[in-house]
Image: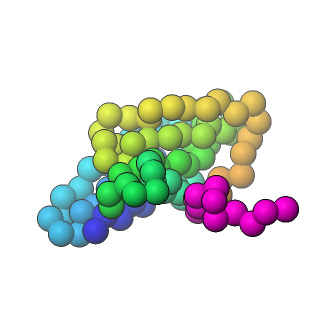
Amino acid sequence: RNAHAPDPRQANAGYVRFDHATSQQVFWDAGAGTDLAECCFAPKSANAAEGEGYLMGVATRQNEGGRGDLVILDAQHLEDGPVAVVKLPVRAVGQVHGWWVPEAQLPVA
């Protein structure tokens, strides 16, 4: 029902949540001088309702020499801004492709 993607109005400067049932959009702007990579969604729990979880993406701070941040947002409350920002000491690769699985589903080494 919900989709999360960079907002085309701002190139790579924000994320938007689009509700396919209501056509409602909520936009979070990362601010000037910031480029955002594709985000990943992590549910809050194994039995979380649809859309209940976190968006995580790499923010490249162009005005800080390209240094990266890991930005974490509540997917249901993008308008509140990040719930956490992990300041990375180096430039990070912008495209992080992946998904989250419960620990119990990971193969045992």
Residue found at x 59% / y 61%: 101
What colouring style does the render use? rainbow
In the picture shown, does residue 54 fall above or below 4? above
Question: x%, y% of residue 104?
Answer: 63, 59
Question: x%, y% of residue 43?
Answer: 45, 54
101 lies left or right of 46: right
Question: x%, y% of residue 21?
Answer: 18, 69
Residue found at x 51% / y 32%: 84
The answer to if 108 sits in the magenta stretch is: yes
In which quadrant of the rendered image does the C terminus lie?
bottom right
The answer to if 15 sits in the magenta stretch is: no
Magenta segment range?
98-109
Q: State the residue in front, 7 or 26.
A: 26
Q: State the residue in front, 80 or 41.
A: 41
Q: Hey, which quadrant is residue 4 in on the image?
A: bottom left
In which quadrant of the rendered image does the N terminus lie?
bottom left
102 lies left or right of 51: right
Q: State the residue in front, 36 or 74.
A: 74
Q: Main secondary structure of the magenta part?
A: loop
Residue 7 visible in the snapshot: no
Q: Give the total of numbered labels.
A: 0
97 lies left or right of 18: right
Considering every residue shown, the one lying at the far left of the view is 22
Question: x%, y% of residue 8?
Answer: 38, 60
In the picture shown, does residue 39 fall above or below 74? below
Residue 2 visible in the snapshot: yes
Q: State the residue in front, 61 or 79.
A: 79
Residue found at x 75% / y 66%: 107
